[in-house]
Amino acid sequence: MIVINNLTKIYTGTSPEVLALDNVSLTINPGEIFGIIGLSGAGKSTLIRCINMLEKPTKGSIIVDGQDITKLEKKDLRKTRQKIGMIFQHFNLLSSRTVYDNIMFPLEIAKIPPKQAQAKVNQLLELVGLTEKAKVYPSQLSGGQKQRVGIARSLANEPKILLSDEATSALDPDTTKSILKLLKNINDELNITILLITHDMNVIKQVCDKV
Ligand code: ADP
Ligand code: MG
């Protein structure tokens, strides 16, 4: 469960300062696909970056499984962050690494033993339907395939929560549908809570339990 209380974020590095989040409170239940919709500039990415602690909130708390993650020390923060996967609009793949090695990357960082890591990567390739593409580079993939790699990579450390920031915004409608279907499968089969950010009401309608 994620409980957000009175979350406020003010960017102070600019003049004038920007009030990006103004006293946001919400509860996301385990296993939910929770949608957040808003216009460009509404503060969606800021909210998601606060949840994985890439951005420090100005005020308020974010309780994940009973623990206020805004108060974590560096070491615990790294551990908690591994339990939160993230996917992006522009995929953020490493262009010099193959599909296989992109998915391997977070497992290397987490120092997972090679045998176990290889098995995990193969399992994830199968889950996202890219076993055949293991050896190719991101530039040789379609947008939808790139996002499948992004999804596989985000699941490598077996997160409990998956954050999706406009993950289908760069894709055509049919590809969007297939990616949303994959997210729904992952939610069902792996019981991962998904926080899905979008500016598109159709995305919300297709997969979200709440908005
Ligand atoms: P969204 O994802 O909904 O489009 P953002 O969270 O990216 O919105 O941005 C919310 C507001 O905060 C915008 O006005 C944006 O310009 C501002 N903002 C975002 N990031 C920064 C930053 N690093 N420094 C200053 N202002 C920022
Ligand atoms: Mg955004």
Image (cartoon, helix red, strand yellow):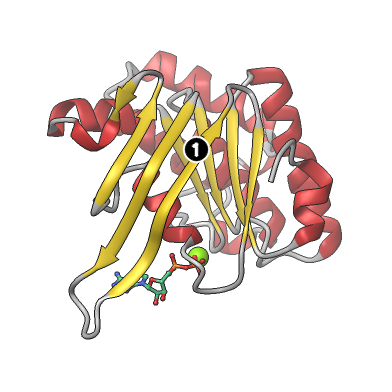
Q: Residue at x 36, y 48 (%)?
A: 7
Q: Position of residue 145 (x, y in %)?
A: 68, 52
How many marks do you count on the picture?
1
Amino acid type, callout 1: Ser
The percent position of residue 8, horizontal first and vertical second, equals 33, 55
Name which quarter of the figure residue 200 lies in: bottom right
- Up/down of 106 relative to 133, above or below: above
Q: Is residue 105 visible?
A: yes
| Quarter of the rendering containing residue 131 | top right
Q: 126 or 184: which is nearer to us?
A: 184
Front one among 21 and 109: 21
Q: Position of residue 29 (x, y in %)?
A: 58, 25
User: 188 left or right of 86?
Assistant: right
- 198 or 59: nearer the viewer: 59
For the point 31% across and 22% down, the residue is 67
Is any atom of residue 100 visible in this view? no
- Rendered residue at 32%/16% (across/down): 113
What residue is shown at x 46% (from left), y 59% (from top)?
45
Q: Secondary structure at mark 1?
A: helix
- The picture quadrant where one finds residue 111 is top left
Residue that mark 1 sits on: 154
Q: Is residue 69 above or below residue 167?
A: above
Relative horizontal placement of residue 174, taking residue 199 as reference (left or right)? right
